[in-house]
Amino acid sequence: MRTRIDAVVSSVLCLAACTYALPGSAQIVPDGTLPINSLVTSNGNSFVIDGGTVEGKNLFHSFGEFSVPTGSEALFNNAASIENILTRVTGGGISNIDGLIRANGGANLFLLNPNGIVFGANARLDIGGSFLGTTANSIVFENGEQFSATDPAAPPLLTVNVPVGLQFNGQTREIRVRGEGHSFRSDHPVFAPIVGENNGSGLQVNPGNTLALVGGDLLLEGATLTAAGGRIELGGVEVGFVGLTAPLAVSGVQSLSPQSEQWGFDYDEVSVFRDVRLIRQAAADVSGIGIGSMQIVGRQLMFSDGSIALLQNQGSQTFGSLRSRASESLTLTGTTPGGVIPSGFRQETVGMGNSGNIEIATRQLQVREGAQIFNRTQVAGNAGNTEIRAFESIELAGTLPINPIASSLIANASFGMGFAGNIAISTQNISVRGGAVLSSGAFGEGSAGNLIVNATESIEVIGAEPRINSGSIIGSSSLGRGNAGSVIINTSRATVRDGGAIGSNVLAIGNSGRVVVNATELVEVNGTIPGSTISSAIDASATIVDEATQQALRLPPIPSGSPGDVEINTPRLNLKNGGQVSVSNEGTGGAGNIQVNAEAIFLETGGKIAASTLSGEGGNVQLILEDTLQLRNGSFISAEAGGTGNGGNIGIYSSAIALFQDSTIRANAFEGNGGNISIATSGIFPSADSSITASSRFGVDGLIEINNPEVDSAAGLLELQKNPIAPNSLIVADCSPRQGNSLIVTGRGGLPPDPEEQIIGDRPWADLRDLSAFRGERASASPSAEVREAIVEANAWRVNERGEVELVAVLKAEDTAIGSSPQSCSGQELSSRKNRRSGD
């Protein structure tokens, strides 16, 4: 019994699917609801549609059924003066289109069927203007009148006015488009542009016009939509009003004339959206010459299997924007079977014109398994900007399973002379995992743009692609002459783990940009790529890559560009298990600088803050902390230089510093001078196996200065008088020479007494005892004065009897000593001989 029921159910489902997809004959049947009804004439597989009601430049048709089977053709035989053909289907059936729809002249064609529209793989359009297929209930005009497909019994209020919108009242049916998939190809999913054309397959409109599908659920299954240099609109709507505008005005009135080229769609009054899915290599393509643009709006937007929204500017004008709006989520997954064309969004310019912007608004964004959001320039034109607003989260994860080089990617890049454009991302949480990449790159003469990420709650850069040891990245890079852009991160918590990196890198001539991380709670960098020594990092670097990569990317063997600076502002910075904050240069130039402003920094198990060069000048490291700096288990802070470069300087300002378990602070050099280390702290606590060094192997060692800012060096000092005693008043004439005089003064310190003043006892003392009994005769003798020869300066010379020159002092008449007058010493001849004999 169970087997029989399953068989019946399967048969019913198969029959329903076949009936839904394959109409047996042409079904173009007027419903007789217009003042002048449509007239259908068949001639084999060709059906000519005449009649209809004309109001001004609008032609109205109304059908109970409208389908065009495989190999059939439906021709709207309109007058050349008609600008808009408005067609509604009022019956209960789906419109199955697997043949050709034609119209005369340059008229725009509206096809309105609330019960659903299916375009088969053989469906084609041959119209001069734009095409709109919709499952809305009615078309609304600017005077408020409606051309309704769900209420055909109401008297039709036909108008000469242009349509201004589409009204959806709920229970909206889907639009489905089938095809064989696009035939795009590329020499490389990143470094080469996309080439190939649809060769007339799928739904197409003439260059510069609009191809729009706005309904309930919208499914493109291997379908290809083409509007070269024009506009593609994909909208999934359940309830609400979709505004419709034209960019050009004719006599002050908005018009949908062919000259207006592109329509505009506004979803601000839509309350309930439906899904839009592109699968099996589906494509929406506006590549060409002109001002191509695209908008995709719905509840859940999904691209998979190499399905792509492509805007390739092949001319000299600036392209329009690619806008995507999802009320719930946007999901991009996978590539074509060979891994050549990624699923996703691509804006690129291959000519002199600029590419347009990519603008995404959604609640959640997922980019997985090699899918891409990519804005790039190949030649002289500039790439546009990429702006992503995901109100809850962004997940960028993994690589293509069959090709580990094909990373999931959000990027802007310049491969020529043009500017790469900026990337701005706003969300609550962003996660970059498994080798995925969020980057801005310069691969030619042009510079990369800046990358700004605002995540109110968290940023995670985690893991790597294990097959090639390629870490997940948020960063910018330069592989040519152009400079890399700056990377600015604003968040509450930033986590870089298991080989992930936030940074700016240069491999050639251009310079890298600044890296700034602002986190209101925590920055943590932890670990390496599992099974390797490649560290998780926040860094700016100039790097030498292997020879195979140099040849593949045409890179110089040694980079000459300079890395930028790294700045981190956070209450707490944790560097663990090899995690690092670094600036480095493996080329000929100097390193950038590192500045960290934090409350506390913790380095554990090989964590490091390092500025290093291979041969250039070392970079500087400045750490400004409100609380403590701790280094444990082989962690270090360094500013080192190899070759002839001088070591960088290290400045640390912290309330307390602890170095434990073989941790170091060093500013060393090889042939150049060692750097200087300046530390201001209230206390420094090193273990016996830890060290602070500023040395050079062959140059001059640097200086290490440690200050305690809490010690007041002025404590205990007294302020001196502003007008000190003149020293001249304390100087008297010297004593007479050759006399036996002496002067001994004993005091308590300070200024000595003036020898010209009366000597006053410092502490007067009198003995009141009767000493008469102890007095006796005593012989008194004056001590004989020892007369010493005075040393007199020589003032003349003479030759003695041995022929030697002697220096002598000749006493002048006025130099005779009188009494105790402090004059020069009496004439006494002093001699100093200098032998003139040879050999002396």
Image (spheres, rainbow, N blue to C red):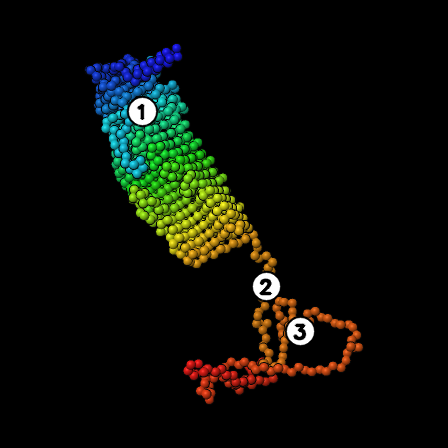
Q: Is residue 835 above or below residue 11?
A: below
Residue 297 on image: x %, y %:
36, 27
Residues at marks 3 and 1 touching, judged by CB atoms closer than 8 Å:
no
**Closer to the eye: label 2 or 1:** 1
The residue that appears at 36% across and 51% down in the rendered structure is 589
Q: Pinpoint residue 124: horizontal percent, then vertical percent.
A: 25, 23
Name the residue nearer the viewer: 545 or 584.
545
Q: Amino acid at mark 1?
A: Glu
* Numbered circle sitting on residue 221: 1
Q: Which mark is residue 759?
A: 3
User: Residue 106, located in which quarter of the rendered image?
Assistant: top left
At 71% from the left and 70% from the top, the residue drawn is 764
Q: Quadrant of the N terminus?
A: top left
Q: Quadrant of residue 49?
A: top left
Where is residue 792 shown, x and y percent of the image?
Answer: 53, 81
Tag 2: amino acid: Gln
Disc nearer the start of the sequence (3/2):
2
